Amino acid sequence: MGTKYTIGVDYGTQSGRAVLVDLANGHEVADHVTPYPHHVIDERLPVSGIKLEHDWALQHPDDYLEVLRKSVPAVIAESGIDPVDVIGIGIDFTACTMLPIDEAGEPLCFDAELIDQPHSWVKLWKHHAAQPEADKINQIAAQRGEAFLPRYGGKISSEWMIAKIWQILDEAPEIYERTDLFLEATDWVISQMTGNVVRNSCTAGYKAIWHKQDGFPSKEYFKALDPRLENLVDTKLRGEVIALGTNAGGLTDKMAGIMGLKPGIAVAVGNVDAHAAVPAVGVVTPGKLVMSMGTSICHMLLGTEEKQVEGMCGVVEDGIIPGLYGYEAGQSAVGDIFEWYVEESLPAYVKEAAAAEGLGIHQWLEREAATYKPGQTGLLALDWWNGNRSVLVDTDLTGLILGMTLLTKPQEIYRTLLEATAFGTRKIVDAFHSNGVSVDVLYACGGLPQKNHLLMQIYADVTNREIVIADSKQTPALGAAMFAAVAAGQGAGGYDTIIDAAEKMARVKEETFKPIPANVEVYDSLYKEYSQLHDYFGRGENDVMKRLKNIKKSSE
Ligand SMILES: Nc1ncnc2c1ncn2[C@@H]1O[C@H](COP(=O)(O)OP(=O)(O)O)[C@@H](O)[C@H]1O
Ligand SMILES: O=C(CO)[C@@H](O)[C@@H](O)COP(=O)(O)O
């Protein structure tokens, strides 16, 4: 049949990236990045210049099409392959990144009448202005004993679909009325490529409270939130929910022309970035926790049963790999904490020393921090610089460093911050493992594993588990290309299941990080101390962090 390819497109926060992948071995033949022309819209709307309120984060839907227009032809050109050998395309996206569309499938913000209405635009995953709605969603669900709440670790996030929809209804009822459908951006882009509107099981499950057996929450629940939401599911959330790897339909003639591909090729249903990365590191069975490590960490895990785990972001059947339950948890700041330290708190002499040696600041700090043994700094930190996503689900918690003296060095603080994030991950690992969702080995992808070896060794030592590292730097895009291969099917040169695709296309490095027994022992005692601080400050025994925030607010 000759060499066949698929394209995976990874839609991140700042840019979209297309990767052309050889189906025989997962080799990434070419890639191309298109920065979003309108960036993240968090101050003023394009065209009208209307000012946005605090905590808003929007995007421009045409930026997503721009990625298809630019990056897809670019990977074809760069690779020099014949486009007829591309048998499918798949995408992964940040989530919940959602938008209102009209009957014709057009985003409301494309309508000249609505362009100056902030609520007609795409709400990006990190739009955090729907917290009042999220609070009521949780309070009413808890009062009514809604069965869905434990599936989301006890809390629905303000980042997710229902809170965002309700904010639109609350603040711009006319936009709500004009909306035919609320869609995840990942599903909208697929609709643009195929002409079909379908919802993928991943975002529906993790972000819109959809359950394979129970569907969405009941009409009674939505009515209890707001009588105007009673029929939301049958109206503006309608549409079939389809498992990952399904062909959403063939690529339309129009989009094929624009992208330089063959019309009719398979287009896989949409997916989420962190979730798409799981099969791309070859994880298709339980027991292997995949960490997508960058500014934050998403922790992904598979299981054969639906279990309740404190503070997880969600458990969704078919949510990651069809046929299994997919679990997600997370830490809302990891690389961001290291960046804060380097940018906001590091003495100038360290920057000068690093520059004098021609080293990056992180590299200098990593090298110096690596000269310490576990415990040797005498320091301990709580990693809550951006609140705590799992397991406490509390954005009002803040960071803490304990044990400093007049002799404390910057590299000791840096090491302590690395360790604190590892303890945060161990809390998540322990929460899953002790609730019957076993975690035997860790897999790491994203930017951090490539950048900081000390960090990875600390994670192996703190969790007492081996860590396998992704070989691809574009792991989510590779995963999206694998799901495209499944959507195309074996008959067309692809694969019939994501398990077959993972066997041939997933890639990890040979070198792994293994726990060092002597370090494990010391970290076990430090973790006990971390756990005491974690519970003392995080579970209500001493709410000083919240009181400080309140004092700060009232002093502003
Ligand atoms: N050598 C390093 N060690 C630790 N953290 C680093 C290092 N270099 C960059 N970072 C942090 O990693 C984060 C970027 O991670 P990356 O995976 O590239 O991005 P993203 O999460 O946006 O995909 C930033 O927060 C940055 O401060
Ligand atoms: O929340 C999820 C996945 O559930 C992510 O899409 C969101 O945090 C964005 O992640 P990135 O910053 O793009 O790594």
Image: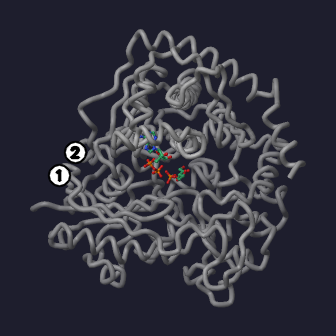
Q: In this view, does 422 lie above or below 246?
A: above
Query: Do the residues bearing badges 1 and 2 touch, measured as CB atoms within 8 Å?
Result: yes
- Percent x, y of residue 246: 39, 59
Query: Quadrant of the image for the N terminus?
Result: bottom left
Element under disc 2? helix
Q: Where is residue 145 in the image (x, y as percent from the top left)?
A: 79, 40
Depth check: give the residue in front, 286 or 213.
286
Mark 1 vs mark 2: which is more N-terminal? 1
- The numbered mark at residue 24 is 1
For badge 2, the amino acid type reads: Lys
How far apart in space, not on screen, are marks 1 and 2 (Cα)?
A: 7 Å
Circle 2 sits on which residue?
A: 504
Say what secondary structure mark 1 lies in: loop
Q: In this view, does 447 lie above or below 241?
A: above
Q: Residue at x 64, y 33 (%)?
A: 391
**Spot occupied by residue 33 in the image (x, y as percentages of width and height):** 36, 65
Residue 240 visible within the image: yes
The residue closer to the viewer here, 360 or 79, is 360
- Classify 10 Å Cα crowding around label 2: few (below 14), some (14-19), many (20 and above): some
Q: Position of residue 389 (x, y in %)?
A: 64, 40
The quadrant holding residue 237 is bottom right
Left or right relative to 439: residue 50: right
Q: Is residue 423 left or right of residue 237?
A: left
